[in-house]
Image (tube, helix red, strand yellow):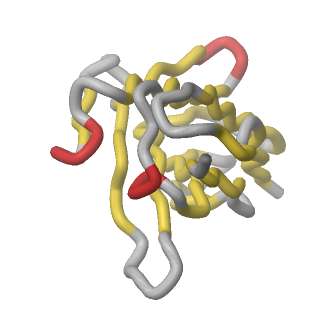
Amino acid sequence: QVQLVESGGGLVQPGGSLRLSCVASGRIFRIYGMGWYRQAPGKQRELVAAIRVSGSTNYADSVKGRFTISRDNAKNTVYLQMNSLNPEDTAVYYCNAEIQTDLTIDTYWGQGTQVTVSS
């Protein structure tokens, strides 16, 4: 059984910052790509940022220059540093990881953490 648990969401004023964390646990042999998605009310879930095992990253255009994704492979953890937040960033943020267990490679999702940007 593999679990992803996010933390770090909350209420922040426009222009503020938050740091999200996501820890993977369970019978993990190896973690490949990791990423953050978000879903705002009435909208589809969208990719925010992704990071490969190599450390290479890609970002949605709307967050480039404001958000930074990173990972700590020793801790099975992925982070999302979010700066210069604006109300359009309000959403539930989900982490995602491609994880190899004993014999299979599957994609796992966290339960989500709410980020609200409001004055």
Tell me if residue 98 comes above or below residue 7 in the rendering.
below
Q: Quadrant of residue 93?
A: bottom right
Residue 98: x and y, percent? Answer: 49, 49
Tell me if residue 25 comes above or below residue 77 in the rendering.
below
91, 117: nearer the viewer: 117
Residue 20: x and y, percent? Answer: 64, 33
Q: Residue at x 33, y 27 (%)?
A: 66
Q: Residue at x 60, y 62 (%)?
A: 92
Q: Residue at x 78, y 52 (%)?
A: 3
Q: Residue at x 36, y 31 (%)?
A: 51
Residue 15: x and y, percent? Answer: 46, 30
Left or right: 4 in relation to 20: right
16, 20: nearer the viewer: 16
Q: Residue furthest bottom?
A: 42
Q: How many marks?
A: 0
Quadrant of the frame with the N terminus: bottom right
Residue 90: x and y, percent? Answer: 52, 57
